[in-house]
Image (cartoon, rainbow, N blue to C red):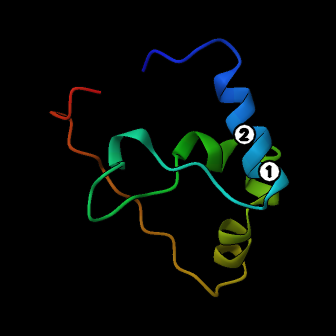
């Protein structure tokens, strides 16, 4: 992806502040949008995200997806 400098940091900061997450760019517009794996590994992201906290608590289930490699991303 061709993102402007600082765009990823801004996305992470916004997601952390709202207890949200970042959707994987390869799953945008699909029937199964997924949380970005990079965000799940981010030190602040994995702690702040409500969805990831619920998954760690066993309320939600994490299902790894393998996005289509032919998406051009």
Q: Are marks 2 and 1 in contact (CB under 8 Å)?
A: yes
Task: State the image coordinates of residue 4 (x, y, percent, origin top left).
Answer: 59, 14
- The quadrant the C terminus occupies is top left
- The quadrant the N terminus occupies is top left
- Determine whether, in the image, residue 23 is placed left or right of residue 5: left
| Residue closest to the eye, 68 or 17 | 17
**10 Å crowding of disc 2: few (<14), some (14-19), many (20+):** some
**Which residue is pictured at 44% across the width and 57% down the height?**
34
Pointer 1 residue? 16
**Which residue is pictured at 70% across the width and 60% down the height?**
20
Task: State the image coordinates of residue 19 (x, y, percent, origin top left).
Answer: 78, 62
Residue 26 sits above or below residue 33 on the image: above
Pointer 2 residue? 12
Disc 2 element: helix
**10 Å crowding of disc 1: few (<14), some (14-19), many (20+):** many
Residue 71, quarter of the rendered image: top left
Residue 58 sits above or below residue 9 on the image: below
Disc 1 element: helix
- Determine whether, in the image, residue 61 is placed left or right of residue 47: left
Q: CA distance from mark 2 to mark 1?
A: 6 Å
**Which residue is pictured at 42% across the width and 68% down the height?**
63
The disc label shown at residue 45, or none: none
Task: State the image coordinates of residue 45 (x, y, percent, origin top left).
Answer: 75, 49
In the image as oriented, which residue stretches furthest toward the bottom? 59
**Which residue is pictured at 65% across the width and 24% down the height?**
7
Task: State the image coordinates of residue 37 (x, y, percent, origin top left).
Answer: 53, 46
| Residue closest to the eye, 37 or 18 | 18
């Amino acid at each position: 992806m061709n993102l402007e400098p600082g765009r990823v940091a801004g996305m992470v900061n916004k997601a952390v502040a709202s207890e949200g997450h970042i959707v994987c760019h390869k799953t945008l517009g699909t029937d199964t949008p997924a949380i970005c794996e990079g965000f799940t590994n981010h030190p602040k992201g994995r702690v702040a995200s409500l969805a990831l906290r619920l998954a760690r608590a066993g309320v939600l289930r994490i299902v790894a997806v393998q996005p289509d490699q032919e998406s051009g991303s």
